[in-house]
Image (spheres, rainbow, N blue to C red):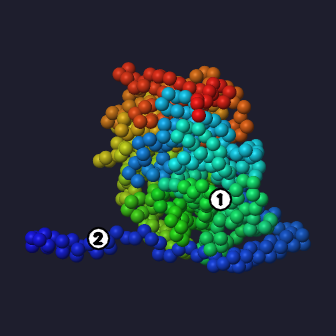
Amino acid sequence: MPRKSRLLILLFAALLPLAVVAAPSTSPRKTLRPFASEQELKALFDQWAEESRRRQEGRRSFGAMAEAPASAPQALAKAAEAMSADSVTNVQHAGVDEGGIVKLHGDHLVILRRGRLFSVATSDLKPVSVIDAFGPGVDPRGAWYDEMLISGSTIAVIGYSYARGGTEIGLFEIARSGELSYRATYHLRSNDYYSSRNYASRLIGSKLVFYTPLYLNPWRGNPYDQLPAMRRWGEDKFRRIAPATRIYRSDEQLDPWQGMALHTVTVCDLSRRDLDCESTAVLGPTGRVFYVSPASVFVWNVKAAVFRIPLDGGAPSALKVSGSPLDQFSFLEGSDGFLNVLVRAQGRGEAMWSSELRGGELALLRVHLSRFSDGRDSANQADYQPLPSAPGHHSLQNRYVGQYLLYGGQRQLFAVRYTDGSSYGLPLPHGVDRLEALGEDAVAIGSDGRDLHFSSVRLAPYPTVAGRFTRVNANQGESRSHGFFYNERQGLLGLPIIGAQQRSLRHQLRHTSASVLYLRNQSLNFAEIGTLDASADANTNDGCRASCVDWYGNSRPLFIRNRVFALMGYELVEGQLGREGIAEVRRVNFSPFGGFRPGPA
């Protein structure tokens, strides 16, 4: 070996340890403490029971003590580099699929709608199979079947039952022919997970991951009946899936009479025939926003701390914090080992419609993951960078794109370079109802009360509005993040739209979008290539028995192997791109009572 080459190797070997030191480990210094045994957990429950007895006696003797809080919030109404080229879901993280209403399996689209699963062949747009999204013998009344994920030939439908109380996981099989069949249903203890923005379930490889809160009421019933557990449908007894040694807590004193929850992350292996799930839970105050990165689940307790729960089964850690994120898009676990979170002073978490409310001043929290510990350490004041407030009463949207945090509301967009805090204000002639990535750049979409605007945002060398497109007399037809899709390879973006007069979120829950609009992105200048439109009579009576409100939306732009589709309720329309724009090629109505004709098995 030449002398020069040997010297280079020796120099590289000498510098390698320095390089390792320069990149701090993301491992927490300490972790939360689990209960050492079932006996220790029982001792805590016994302590709460004794305190509850004393409080009840106090009420009987003096009548002066206020009633204990009602059980935790109950819903008054259920108001990797890149993903595969076949991905049809707009996700926050590549490789972390999110539960949705439509997925692609081979040559078939699988669609979850109003309590049923459908499969449609993409080759000739022919319906193949339809099946209830719940198992035989399962009463669907009071249940909502919201989200679907596919791993191999296994379809998992995630739902919540108000009648039975808890999360349901229905497992189905899809054959290569597209034929659907039922396998099993599992029932997990949980409280309602609904959020107007977030999704309960994620899929990483074959691992189904979801967060479910469990609100503890030590003054009512057996506390062991409130711990994470599951059962197969038809079984009488639940099986605990979080032993005491997987239930964690910090050293803080917990007051169950101020509200308390087991923040539970459950991981199930869909590669196994019989569903096998394990849960990790952190005991803490109620209120939550959660975010799933490729490695961890972060659960933000709006009163005290953010919990970091590793997906590899490692011990959780925590950090005391202030404020509350808007939603899952307020988080970014960066490749540099830092956690970045947009927080607001009086946030209320993301349960139900809390994300749509405004709540106080804004700040960017930026801390290295190694700062997480056993829950006794706090983020420093210097870790919070105050941010400009978005004017008006418009609900806020936020998104990380490239090196920037983008957020905005009423006619104002802000871009903050989260690594150094540089902030830019970008006035807009419209509100910000949606923020999406366009590769390394972004688009802000919103209404001015009459027209729908698309403002492209170039982020390098510094943020600036690069172009704008206006669709007159229109509004977006989907507020869910999955309602948008950008096909970077083709430079095409799609978004469902409705008329400007149909602005309310309530309209989206009961009616499908009028059209799906497609734009071409040419150096951040948008040009309309056309729409694919719904039929006026497409929404006929479907004999719905469950999930008869489209809480998770009903319209999607779909890009499948250089082909363009629009899903609008029970209609699937294919368009063809040409010099004059997009033209309809064919459509199918797969409603069970409006034209569904299953093909040969």
Of all residues, the one furthest to the front in this rendering is 601
Q: Dot 2 corresponds to which residue? A: 19
Of all residues, the one furthest to the right in this rendering is 61
Q: Is residue 35 above or below residue 288?
A: below
In terms of image quadrants, where is residue 126?
top right
- Evaluate if marks 2 and 1 touch, with contact meaning CB atoms under 8 Å apart: no
Q: Is residue 364 above or below residue 525?
A: below
Question: Element under label 2?
Answer: helix
In terms of image quadrants, where is residue 469?
top left
Callout 2 crowding tier (Cα within 10 Å): few <14, some 14–19, many ≥20: few
Q: Dot 1 corresponds to which residue? A: 213
Horizontal and vertical percent for residue 59?
Answer: 86, 69
Asked whether residue 501 appears in the rendered view, the answer is no
**In front of the other: 486 or 312:** 312
Inspect the image, locate mark 2, and give the three-letter code of the amino acid beneath it: Ala
Left of 159 or right of it: where is 176? left
**In front of the other: 539 or 26:** 539
Inspect the image, locate mark 1, and give the three-letter code of the amino acid beneath it: Pro
**In front of the other: 111 or 281:** 111
Horizontal and vertical percent for residue 298?
Answer: 53, 61
